[in-house]
Image (cartoon, helix red, strand yellow):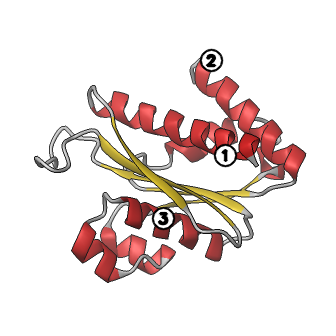
Amino acid sequence: MDADLVALSAALGSACYQRQLLLATAESCTGGWAAQVITHTAGSSAWFERGFITYSNQAKVDILGVRLQTLEKLGAVSPETAAEMAAGALKNSNALISLAITGIAGPTGGSPGKPVGTVCFAWCRVGEAANAETAVFAGDREAIRRQAVVHALRGLLLRLDAA
């Protein structure tokens, strides 16, 4: 694991631990990469509760409770789906905060409205509405996925620092 990801994991771990927050992740296009980065840090069991890898739409529905209507109307790659994933991660865990990632890592699967590199994120705290956003990353599949992990973890750190 590269030094940037190691440092990001350590910073996130420190922030969660200091605030006594357990984290859950809900990932699609990153396939558990965010959870892998998080658990790279020794002692992460003190602040990382669990991760959900819900690659298919059916898994998003079955495991996280994403509404089929959301998927049919807006697609798996939408801020609304990411928000429902983040909320579902909280509902199905003991975590107090969560993050969700869903996107199109490529090399195929894009469309004019949602090109390859489009990734939607959401961050959620128990008792609050999820905060969701969309980013578009450049590069090959690996680069897009890595950028998505970094964005998700940095986004959570920013939200923790602002709280």
Q: For the residue carrying disc 1, how many other residues have a C-alpha within 10 Å: few (<14), some (14-19), or many (20+)?
A: few
For this view, does 77 lie left or right of residue 51? left
Mark carried by residue 3: 2
Residue 138 falls in image quadrant = top left
Residue 10: x %, y % from top left: 74, 31
Residue 135: x %, y % from top left: 37, 41
Whichever of callouts 1 and 2 sits on the residue coming sooner in the sequence is 2
The residue pinned by badge 3 equals 83
For this view, does 91 lie left or right of residue 119? right
Residue type marked 1: Arg
Whichever of callouts 1 and 3 sits on the residue coming sooner in the sequence is 3
Q: For the residue carrying disc 2, how many other residues have a C-alpha within 10 Å: few (<14), some (14-19), or many (20+)?
A: few
Q: Residue furthest top?
A: 3
Check disc 3 and report its element: helix, strand or loop.
Answer: helix
Q: Is residue 2 above or below residue 43?
A: above
Q: Is residue 106 above or below residue 68?
A: above
In front: mark 1 or mark 2?
A: 1
Which quadrant: the N terminus? top right
Judging depth in this view, the residue of 108 and 39 nearest the camera is 108
Residue plotted at (32% across, 81% down) = 68
Do callouts 1 and 3 mark residues in contact (Cβ within 8 Å)? Answer: no
Whichever of callouts 2 and 3 sits on the residue coming sooner in the sequence is 2
Residue type marked 2: Ala
The residue pinned by badge 1 equals 159
Check disc 2 and report its element: helix, strand or loop.
Answer: helix
Check disc 1 and report its element: helix, strand or loop.
Answer: helix
